[in-house]
C-alpha cells in the first residue's frame, strides 16, 4: 500500500488502542513485523492545553516503522491549530478518529458521533487536510446505528483524505457481533484511495478472510493483545527471540518512562493477556491479577513460558 508518498511493506498494521498500545507494546509489535503503528487517540484540546499528558502519550520508539498519530475532536478551529502541534511532528501520517463509541467521547460530538453529523465530519476533514503537511486519514465504523460506510467513505475521499480504515461494526454494536467483511469489500470497490480493513482478525483464517475483501492493508487490534507475535505468524517468519524475552522488552521500554507504582497496575492486563495464551495458566493468572511486583510477575511468566 502507498499512502501519498509513504510506502508500506507488508501492510500489517497495529490498531490504535487507548490504554493498551503503549510505546513498549508498539515497539515489540514493530520488532515482530507490524508495518505501521498508531498512537493512542490524542485529544486536540489536550494537545493545546495539557502538554504534560500529551507529551507522555506521544512517546514513540525508534523501532516503529510508519508512525501514525491519531487525533480526535469536534471543533475544526481547535483541530486546525492542533494539527501542526510539535507533538505531532514525529508522525508521518495523521489519522482522525471518527469511530470511538465511548460515551464520554460521543457525548462531546466526537469519535463515532461524527458519523451522525456528516456535515461537521466533512468540515473537520477539510480543515485538517488544508492545515496539515502530512497525509490525513480517517478511521471510522459502519455507522452510528446503521451501515452508512459507503457514503461516509465517499465523503472522506471527496473531502481530501489519503486513506480510510473501516472497523466494520456500528458504534451501537460496540464490540459485539461480528465485523461485516462484505461492507469492507463494498467500500474497497467504491473508493479510489487505499482502504484498511479492521475487525476480528485474530488468526490465519480470519486474516485470509480479510484479505479476500481486497483491502490494501489489514489492521489488528485485540488479536495482538498478549500475542504481539501474531505479526510474525502472519508473515510466516520465525521468532528471533523467545516469547519471554519479548515480554521483558515490552516491560523494559515502559520502565524508562513510567514509575513502578503506576506501571505495576497498568501492566497487569498485559501480563494476564500474555499468560492467557499459554497452556495451564489458570493458577498463574490468579497470582498475576493481584501481583504488586513487576519482577514477581515476570518470574511467574518466565516459568510459565518455560513449561
Ligand atoms: C482497549 C481498546 C482501545 C481502543 N482504542 C482505540 C483508539 O484509541 N482509537 C481507535 O480508533 N480505535 C480504538 N479501538 C478500536 C480498535 O482500534 C479496533 O478498531 C477494534 O478493536 C476492532 O479491531 P479488532 O477486532 O482487531 O480488535 C480500541 C479498541 C480496544 C479494544
Image (spheres, rainbow, N blue to C red):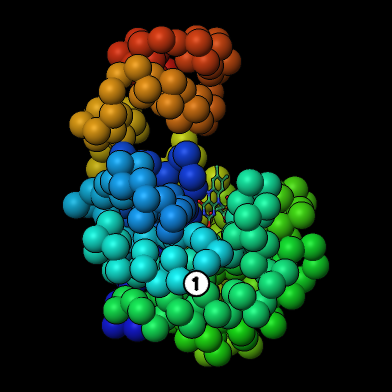
The residue under the point 75% across, 48% down is 176
- The extreme right residue here reads 146
Q: x, y percentage for residue 104?
A: 63, 46
Q: 296 or 89, which lies in front?
A: 89
Secondary structure of the residue carrying numbered label 1: helix
**Could you tell me if residue 226 is visible in this image?**
yes
31 sits to left or right of 135: left
The residue under the point 47% across, 35% down is 226
Residue tagged 1? 76
Q: Residue 181 occupies which quadrant of the picture?
A: bottom right
Q: x, y percentage for residue 109?
A: 64, 60
Q: 71 or 19, which lies in front?
A: 71
Q: 117 or 20, which lies in front?
A: 117
Q: x, y percentage for residue 270?
A: 45, 30
Asked if 116 appears above or below 214 in the picture, the reply is above
Q: How many marks?
A: 1
Asked if 133 appears above or below 158 in the picture, the reply is above
Q: Residue 110 occupies which quadrant of the picture?
A: bottom right
Asked if 56 appears above or below 273 in the picture, the reply is below
Q: x, y percentage for residue 292?
A: 41, 10
The residue under the point 41% across, 26% down is 267
278 sits to left or right of 54: right
Q: Residue 182 occupies which quadrant of the picture?
A: bottom right
Asked if 239 appears above or below 215 in the picture, the reply is above
User: Which quarter of the image is occupied by the N terminus?
Assistant: bottom left
Amino acid at each position: 500500500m502507498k499512502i501519498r508518498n509513504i510506502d508500506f511493506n507488508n501492510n500489517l498494521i497495529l490498531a490504535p488502542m487507548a490504554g493498551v498500545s503503549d510505546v513498549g507494546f508498539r515497539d515489540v509489535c514493530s520488532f515482530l513485523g507490524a508495518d505501521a503503528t498508531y498512537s493512542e487517540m490524542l485529544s486536540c484540546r489536550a494537545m493545546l492545553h495539557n502538554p504534560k499528558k500529551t507529551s507522555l502519550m506521544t512517546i514513540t520508539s525508534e523501532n516503529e516503522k510508519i508512525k501514525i498519530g491519531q487525533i480526535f475532536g469536534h471543533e475544526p478551529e481547535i483541530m486546525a491549530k492542533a494539527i501542526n502541534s510539535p507533538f505531532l511532528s514525529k508522525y508521518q501520517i495523521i489519522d482522525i478518529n471518527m469511530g470511538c463509541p465511548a460515551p464520554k467521547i460521543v457525548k462531546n460530538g466526537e469519535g463515532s458521533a461524527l458519523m451522525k453529523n456528516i456535515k461537521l465530519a466533512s468540515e473537520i476533514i477539510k480543515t485538517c487536510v488544508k492545515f496539515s503537511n502530512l497525509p490525513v486519514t480517517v478511521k471510522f465504523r459502519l455507522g452510528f446505528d446503521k451501515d452508512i460506510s459507503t457514503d461516509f467513505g465517499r465523503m472522506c475521499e471527496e473531502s481530501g483524505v489519503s486513506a480510510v480504515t473501516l472497523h466494520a461494526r456500528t458504534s451501537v454494536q460496540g464490540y459485539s457481533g461480528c465485523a461485516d467483511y462484505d461492507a469492507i469489500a463494498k467500500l474497497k470497490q467504491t473508493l479510489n484511495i487505499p482502504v484498511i480493513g479492521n475487525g476480528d482478525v485474530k488468526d490465519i483464517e480470519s486474516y485470509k478472510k480479510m484479505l479476500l475483501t481486497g483491502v490494501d492493508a489489514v489492521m489488528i487490534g485485540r488479536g495482538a493483545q498478549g500475542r504481539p507475535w501474531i505479526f510474525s505468524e502472519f508473515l510466516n517468519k520465525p521468532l528471533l527471540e523467545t516469547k519471554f524475552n519479548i515480554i521483558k522488552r515490552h516491560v523494559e521500554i515502559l520502565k524508562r518512562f513510567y514509575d513502578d507504582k503506576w506501571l505495576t497496575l497498568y501492566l497487569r492486563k498485559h501480563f494476564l493477556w500474555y499468560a492467557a495464551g499459554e497452556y495451564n495458566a489458570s493458577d498463574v493468572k490468579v497470582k498475576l491479577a493481584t501481583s504488586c511486583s513487576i519482577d514477581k510477575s515476570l518470574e511467574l511468566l518466565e516459568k510459565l513460558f518455560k513449561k
